[in-house]
Image (cartoon, grey):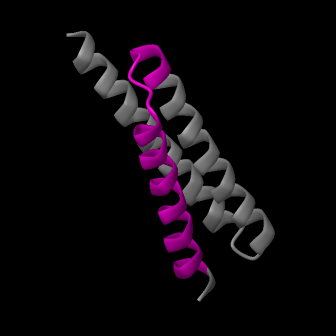
């Protein structure tokens, strides 16, 4: 039961973070610096959430951290390519 609740919280967090970021990026699409700041902020929040979750779960290892870091960097690269080309 606890695992299902944590999965639900993680999914809600991810959806809210994604929707809020998309909304803010499209609302401020004329300002490239602000859009980049929003994307970097969302990536930082995503990484912080992952670190907190795995620290509490006691499963934080270097490969897990690198996976989250590389995922965040990949998403930033893809978004930069989509939004600025």
Q: How many marks?
A: 0
Residue at figure coordinates x 61%, y 40% from the top left: 45
Quick one: which residue is furthest to the bottom in this view? 85
Residue 9 image point, x, y percent: 38, 25
Residue 25 image point, x, y percent: 64, 63
Q: Closest to the observer: 31 or 3?
A: 3
Q: Quadrant of the C terminus?
A: bottom right
Residue 57 image point, x, y percent: 39, 16
User: Magenta stretch mostly in which secondary structure?
Assistant: helix
Judge whether 83 appears above or below 62 on screen: below
Quick one: which residue is furthest to the front in this view? 62
Residue 61 found in image quarter: top left
Q: Closest to the observer: 73 or 43?
A: 73
Q: Closest to the observer: 2 or 50?
A: 50
Residue 59 image point, x, y percent: 38, 23
Q: Quadrant of the N terminus?
A: top left
Residue 44 found in image quarter: top right
Which range is magenta?
54-83
Quick one: which residue is furthest to the left in this view? 1
Side of 46 relative to 39 (left or right): left
Side of 6 relative to 52 (left or right): left
Decide whether residue 10 is among the magenta residues.
no
Residue at figure coordinates x 41%, y 16% from the top left: 58
Residue 8 found in image quarter: top left
Judge whether 11 appears above or below 58 on screen: below
Decide whether residue 77 is among the magenta residues.
yes
Residue at figure coordinates x 75%, y 77% from the top left: 30
Judge whether 50 appears above or below 40 on screen: above
Residue at figure coordinates x 58%, y 54% from the top left: 21
């Amino acid at each position: 039961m606890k695992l299902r609740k944590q999965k639900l919280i993680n999914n809600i967090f991810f959806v809210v973070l994604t929707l809020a970021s998309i909304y803010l990026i499209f609302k401020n699409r004329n300002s490239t610096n602000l859009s980049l700041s929003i994307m970097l902020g969302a990536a930082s929040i995503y990484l912080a959430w992952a670190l907190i979750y795995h620290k509490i779960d006691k499963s934080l290892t270097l490969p897990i951290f690198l996976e989250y870091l590389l995922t965040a960097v990949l998403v930033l690269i893809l978004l930069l390519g989509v939004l600025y080309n």
